[in-house]
Image (spheres, grey):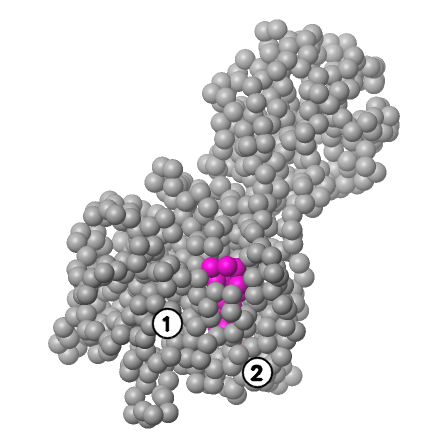
């Protein structure tokens, strides 16, 4: 994730709603942490495991339910800023880029209004904007703005932008060169002011429209964005007429002008939202007949793209700000709009099409407050609140290429319910999540226990065949209900809750990390012979619609395909195939760049084996081996050389495997660090042969007795 994409996440955020009035928030103290002198860089791997929750901000009034979280944003350099408080005052806390601690809070005594806004802007700054009276003008409210400049450890003293009404909304946006634009409405008149540069003063407000007649002055939605080239775009919809108006102002222009050809209809509840794309130009979303629609105007273009449906039943109401990924893809998500389920959508930068991903991040019937942030390894971290009234909790999941990690509960089980979470990425690309937690007091009233936080650690290299993100090798099982991951040990094998469907005749194998994000991926040979690798989110499971990398258009000539791990000693996962015609083994070695090298011959004379099995390192020499069952039902071991070939065979068992329909190796189910074998017989039982570390196995013992394996095929 680039620093620019971090900044875009905060452009034109909707105002933060205040909680109920309560006692003022005192300027509490937290341990200050100095920022690292070295500029941190975003990690290449996906976010690691979630750490324990910790307290971010205590409730200054333990008997009150107010004073909690309002907002969390990430500045261009990865500095994090939170906003907490109630209807009387607010506090900002800063976590400098490269630090894991938060500085002592700054308190804003007059920023308790419902329209207080914290926003990260395109120039790398973070601004706090609110409405309050000034000492020399007791008759009017003024729009005030305090600035956290890039690299600063505190907000500046507030500037006064212009006199405004007490109520109403305002928006701020900025260009990369530091020009800031503010817009607001007064009795149906849209007004704008600019700050041409960091040291410049705000210009006098200018009226952008003629005041409508009385009764027609209410605005149902308004949004502002400033593009990479400095062009400003303002879009709003009139509540009574439903008309959508769009104005723009080029950097050198002296006036705002109408935007030609914006294809947003003046329909009821269109609710247009505008965002600056980090590559230049604008993205506009709006609602139309229960569809979330998207149109784009690229940098330098005069025309808007033909609107396309981004998400059936999606809506700009409750939609996250777009997440722009390093490869240019665009991700949005939201709480249930025109449906009963949360939704998400991803637009491919390479094709311009919205992808048909359908794997849900939550199946709960009550999901609200969905938020998203671009995180390390090209991922998106999504947070939400799920559950029924007074039993809600904070959840998180990580997305990549159409697959989701297993949802993780972040809020404490002891908390009665949690508030709406906020998520942002730090300088390393790790997600940081904040949320409120509440409980019932002795008098049966609801009280805020504080604002809590959680983040992830670094991600280590994945263990071979680990697809549940627990550091242990897992088993794939496929039946009529779909593909599932079975995890456990020698005494228990349990299927995960997520199942994905694949057509009959599809071969699905656990695979290593193809794209370097620290997550094991999945190899698939489609029923028509196409060979693909599906980059998969850690702890997730792909389906046929997920993003995939084509290995070959047709592997139907191979009657055996194995995922043996690393056979060449370079730490990369490889593939092994057998030609049905010649019985030769071919190695497809991983190239470290998301693909494979040209095939090489790994061995000849393997055509007489009924089954070839990836076995892992059976003899402790650090090289992965392969097993084969011949026509006489003898089990043979082919020791790996570490150079993509194999040593002469050695006998493991005689008269073995006649009752088995599937045999899988390379799993350490016994937990002793040695590769075991698990086999399914035709009567629906699973058997374990523990590896002895010397190239052989102990006698079998039954495992997974709680599962009927008769209709399941394992890999």
Residue 199 - label = 1
Residue 646 drawn at (x, y percent): 74, 16
Residue at image location 56% in from the left, 39% down from the top = 536
Badge 1: how crowded within 10 Å, few (<14), some, or many (20+)?
A: few
Residue under pointer 2: 27
Could you say where residue 476 lies in the image, as x and y percent from the top left?
64, 34
**Among the 4 quarters of the image, the one containing residue 605:** top right
Percent position of residue 195, x then y: 32, 70
Vertical arrangement, residue 403 with respect to residue 33, above or below: above
Residue at the far front in the pictured view: 199
- Of mark 2 and mark 1, the one earlier in the sequence is 2
Left or right for 133, reference 412: left
Give residue 74's position: percent from left, percent from top: 49, 62
**Quadrant housing residue 225:** bottom left
Q: Secondary structure at mark 1?
A: loop
**Residue 504 can be seen, yes or no:** no
Distance (Cα) linking label 2 and label 1: 29 Å
Who is closer to the viewer here, 518 or 426? Answer: 426
Q: Which mark is residue 593?
A: none
Provide the residue span drawn in magenta: 69-84
Vertical order, 456 against 706 (above or below): below
């Amino acid at each position: 994730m680039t620093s620019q994409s971090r900044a875009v996440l905060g452009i034109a955020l909707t105002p933060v709603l205040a909680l109920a009035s309560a006692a003022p928030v005192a300027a509490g103290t937290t341990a200050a942490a100095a920022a690292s002198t070295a500029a941190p860089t975003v990690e290449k791997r996906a976010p690691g495991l979630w750490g324990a929750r910790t307290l971010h901000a205590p409730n200054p009034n333990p008997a009150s339910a107010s004073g909690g979280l309002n907002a969390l944003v990430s500045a261009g350099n990865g500095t994090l800023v939170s906003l907490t408080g109630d209807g009387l005052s607010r506090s900002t806390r800063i976590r400098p880029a490269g630090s894991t601690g938060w500085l002592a809070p700054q308190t804003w005594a007059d920023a308790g209004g419902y329209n207080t806004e914290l926003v990260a802007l395109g120039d790398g700054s973070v601004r706090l904007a609110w409405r309050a009276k000034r000492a020399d003008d007791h008759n009017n409210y003024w729009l005030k703005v305090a600035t956290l400049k890039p690299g600063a450890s505190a907000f500046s003293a507030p500037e006064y932008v212009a006199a405004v009404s007490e109520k109403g909304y305002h928006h701020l946006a900025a260009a990369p060169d530091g020009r800031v634009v503010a817009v607001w409405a007064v009795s149906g008149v849209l007004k704008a002011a600019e700050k041409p540069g960091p040291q410049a003063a705000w210009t006098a407000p200018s009226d952008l429209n003629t005041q409508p007649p009385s009764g027609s002055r209410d605005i149902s939605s308004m949004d502002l964005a400033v593009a990479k080239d400095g062009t400003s775009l303002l879009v709003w919809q009139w509540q009574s007429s439903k008309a959508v108006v769009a104005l723009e102002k080029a950097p050198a222009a002296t006036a705002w002008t109408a935007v030609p050809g914006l294809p947003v209809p003046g329909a009821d509840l269109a609710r247009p939202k505008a965002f600056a794309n980090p590559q230049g130009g604008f993205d506009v979303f709006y609602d139309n007949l229960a569809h979330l629609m998207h149109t784009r105007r690229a940098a330098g273009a005069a025309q808007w793209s033909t609107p396309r449906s981004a998400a059936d039943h999606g809506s700009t109401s409750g939609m996250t700000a777009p997440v722009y990924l390093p490869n240019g893809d665009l991700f949005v998500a939201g709480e249930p709009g025109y449906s009963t389920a949360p939704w998400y959508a991803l637009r491919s930068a390479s094709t311009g099409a919205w992808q048909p991903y359908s794997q849900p991040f939550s199946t709960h019937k009550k999901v609200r407050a969905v938020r998203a942030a671009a995180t390390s390894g090209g991922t998106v971290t999504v947070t939400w609140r799920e559950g029924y009234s007074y039993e809600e909790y904070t959840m998180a999941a990580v997305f990549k290429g159409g697959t989701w990690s297993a949802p993780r509960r972040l809020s404490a089980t002891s908390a009665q319910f949690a508030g709406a979470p906020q998520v942002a990425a730090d300088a390393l690309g790790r997600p940081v999540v904040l949320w409120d937690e509440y409980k019932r007091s002795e008098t049966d009233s609801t009280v805020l226990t504080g604002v809590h936080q959680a983040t992830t650690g670094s991600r280590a290299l994945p263990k071979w065949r680990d697809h549940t993100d627990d550091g242990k090798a897992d088993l794939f099982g496929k039946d009529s209900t779909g593909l599932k991951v079975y995890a456990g040990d020698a005494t228990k094998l349990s299927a995960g809750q997520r199942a994905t469907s694949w057509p009959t005749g599809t071969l699905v194998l656990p695979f290593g990390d193809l794209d370097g994000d620290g997550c094991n991926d999945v190899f698939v040979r489609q029923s028509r012979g196409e060979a693909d690798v599906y980059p998969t989110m850690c702890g997730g499971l792909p389906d046929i619609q997920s993003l995939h990398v084509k290995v070959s258009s047709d592997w139907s000539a191979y009657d055996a395909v194995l995922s043996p791990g690393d056979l060449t000693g370079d730490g990369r996962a490889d593939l092994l195939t057998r030609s049905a015609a010649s019985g030769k083994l071919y190695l497809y070695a991983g190239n470290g760049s998301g693909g494979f090298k040209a095939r090489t011959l790994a061995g000849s004379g393997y055509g007489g084996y009924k089954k070839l099995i990836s076995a892992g390192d059976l003899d402790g020499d650090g090289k992965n081996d392969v097993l084969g069952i011949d026509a006489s039902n003898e089990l043979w071991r082919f020791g790996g050389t570490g150079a993509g070939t194999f040593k002469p065979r050695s006998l493991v068992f005689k008269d073995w495997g006649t009752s088995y329909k599937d045999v899988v190796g390379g799993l350490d189910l016994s937990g002793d660090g040695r590769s075991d074998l698990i086999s399914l017989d035709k009567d629906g039982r699973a058997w374990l042969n523990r590896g002895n570390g010397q190239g052989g196995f102990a006698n079998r013992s039954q495992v997974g007795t709680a599962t009927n394996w008769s209709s399941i095929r394992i890999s």
